[in-house]
Image (spheres, helix red, strand yellow):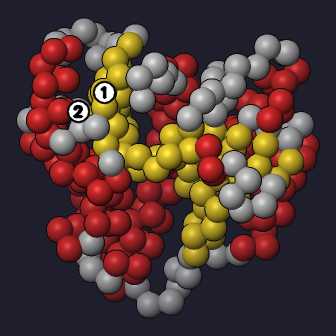
Amino acid sequence: MAGHSKWNNIKRAKGAQDEKRGKIFTKIAREIIVAVKEGGSGDPANNSRLAAAVAKAKAANMPGDNIKRTIEKAMGASGEDNYERVTYEGYGPRGVAVIVEAMTDNRNRIASEMRHHFDKYGGNMGEPGCVSWSFTHKGVIIIDNEDGSLGEDQVITDALEAGAEDIVTSQGFFEIYTLPEDFQTVNDTLESQGYKFLSAEAEMVPSNYIKLTDPADIKNMEKMLELMEDNDDVQNVWHNYEG
């Protein structure tokens, strides 16, 4: 992972999170509900998918009472929340790779909406696997250090001792990578040591990034991502656009 950098994307995501916190909580709540149903347990210790969703919720500053109520709702729910996971892959302007992960109760609707966004803004939706081959599934924990209060050596030591695979530092952030199976252990260990996370979740990490230079391409790419991320059914949008 040496040399990997996505700091502009992190800053962009941080701004979006601050502006749309209510919608983010709603999306995470849906993820928790599906995790409880798929894992068959409301206990994160016995449900790795739920544990990951709770870690993501905490990193987004979702109140603990909200998390608890959402799990309780999922445990008592019958069939009213019939969400299924769907993934779409495609290309933005100049071949930027895009993966959209959604949870929806209407597969036809979300497919139509995603295809529309791809087509309208200079890209096209492809077949499953058309871009995911160039991404790697990783646990990613982002620690904000814009105020410079954390020492780089200490963070690196703590992360490696917790089981991290790699750490990238730059511009006021620490980006900690783990193998998917080690994510929860690293997350819990660092959290117990008092670290506060900007984000903490399993991600699809691209092997390279594409820098757009044409203003029209940049405008189309950013509008496409904005509309995709704003969709109520969309949980994550992974891409290799270096904004």
Q: Can you say whether 241 is above or below 7 in the image? A: below
Say which amino acid is labelled 1: Ile
Residue 46 vs residue 124: left or right?
A: left
Vertical arrangement, residue 204 with respect to residue 30, above or below: above
Q: Badge 2 local density, few (<14 within 10 Å), some, or many (20+)?
A: some
Residue that badge 1 annotates: 167
Question: Going 40% across and 80% down the picture, which residue do you hit?
Answer: 37
Using residue 27 as the reference point, say whether residue 54 is left or right of it.
left
| CA distance separating discs 1 and 2 | 16 Å
SS label for mark 2: loop
Is residue 202 found left or right of 158 in the rendered image? right
Q: Residues within 10 Å of mark 1 (few under 14, many from 20)?
A: many
Residue 59 picture location, percent across and down: 32, 42
Q: Is residue 39 above or below residue 53?
A: below
Residue at image x 77%, y 49%? 90
Marks 1 & 2, CB-CB < 8 Å contact: no
Q: Percent x, y for residue 85?
A: 57, 70
When the figure is inspected, residue 234 is found, relative to residue 12, above or below; the finding is: below
At 91% from the left edge and 43% from the top edge, which residue is drawn?
120
Amino acid type, label 2: Lys
